[in-house]
Structures are given as structure tokens and as C-alpha cells.
Amino acid sequence: MDNYGKAKSQPIDRLSGGPFDVTELVQVRPTIDFGAIQLPMRDDVTYKLEVESSTNKIVALTVEHKGSTLQLQAFSAPGAEGVWHEIRASLEQSILAQGGKTESVVGPLGPELNAQIPTSDGGTRLAKFIGVDGPKWFLRGVITGLALGDTLSMSHIIEIFRSAVVVRGSSPMPPKELLEIVAPSGAQKSVSK
């Protein structure tokens, strides 16, 4: 276990390089509004909303880019403290409890967690968990696919993660509560069972 405590985890250049808080934006780029997360429009990606079938609630936004996927979720967080170190430790414990393997590494955004997660068919699924603590929010990404073994693909996925804009809202929320992701207006909604 690392000794980061409750310090915020974010790249030194977060204010200029992202991920951004909606209040920090200066330049106006066309974006797609998913509620708590906004992403710049790109023609080289596919967006998918992940819906929890029991509640019909959107729980994550997945971005696919040339063989790599990035699942995004934004959570509420305390203003003065970070939650990524605690969340990363919980993820690690959960994966190890399932019989998986983990490795903590430091990447371009700070501490990351590489994981081999057991699957129901007896195999394993490789994933990299990344996270950034912002002002009163936390953005988590789960990277799978080609980017895990290809440096250029990984740099594209990190660029997509860093281009995200988080819209926290001003209502009080308990820490680590999932911020609401919505289908962009005009999007077709399909629920996967």
C-alpha cells in the first residue's frame, strides 16, 4: 500500500492539459454533452453509454478508438482532499480477492493500477485503471484493448481522457457518488441486457 494519504492525485499541468472542470474552460470547442462528462467532438471515436439493466440507469460512458476502449465515470469528491488513492487501494483489494493480479505504476497522470482480472470463463482480462482528482470531483478511466500494449494507442487514449470536461454541479453530494451521465440530446438510446 502506498503512502499518498488523502492528497489529490492529478498531473502538474491539469489546469492547462485536463481533464478540466467546466468552470476552467476558456476556449470554446464543439463538445458532446453527456451530463457530468463532456467530450470534444471527434470523428475517429465511437461513444457508448453503459446502462445498468436492473435500474435502467446510465453508469458509464465508453469511448472506443481504433481497437482501444476507455470507460469513463465521474464521481463527487471533497474539495480539499483526493479520493483516487483510496479508490485505487479498494480496486486492488477487490481484484486480488477475485484471484486477479495487480501492479501499481506511475503513468503520465500519476499513480495507475494495471490489472489482470479473472473472467467467468477461466481466463483473464487486462485493464489499466487511471484517475484524476479535480475540484470537488474525481474522474476515473478504465483502459482496455490495443492501448495496453501499444504506446501510440495509449497516448491517444490518455489524450481523450485529458480532453474530458467534468460538470460537477453545485448541489451537495456525499463523496464518491457517481455523477449523472445522460444520453446527449438527439442520441438513440439502446439498453443492453
Image (tube, rainbow, N blue to C red):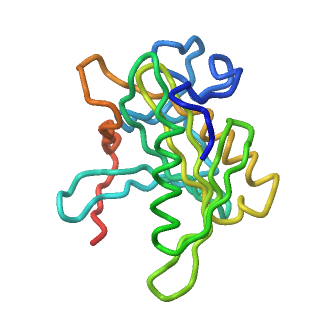
Which quadrant of the figure has residue 171?
A: top left
Q: Whole-percent x and y of residue 7? A: 55, 25
Kindly identify the residue that appears in the image at 57 percent across and 24 percent down: 29
Viewer-proximal residue among 38 and 148 = 148
* Apparent side of residue 70 relative to residue 57 in the rendered image (left or right): right
| Residue 125 in the image: above or below residue 155 | below
| Residue 47 in the image: above or below residue 80 | below
Q: Whole-percent x and y of residue 41? A: 55, 37
Viewer-proximal residue among 34 and 30 = 34
Count of numbered badges drawn on the protein: 0
Residue occupying the far right of the picture: 151
Which quadrant of the figure has residue 54?
A: bottom left
Viewer-proximal residue among 179 and 152 = 179
Q: Whole-percent x and y of residue 163? A: 60, 32
Kindly identify the residue that appears in the image at 39 percent across and 50 percent down: 60
* Apparent side of residue 188 relative to residue 147 in the rendered image (left or right): left
Residue occupying the far bottom of the picture: 121
Kindly identify the residue that appears in the image at 32 percent across and 45 percent down: 183
Kindly identify the residue that appears in the image at 73 percent across and 43 percent down: 106
* Apparent side of residue 19 relative to residue 54 in the rendered image (left or right): right
| Residue 137 in the image: above or below residue 187 | above
Q: Whole-percent x and y of residue 112? A: 64, 46
Quadrant containing the C terminus in the rendered view: bottom left
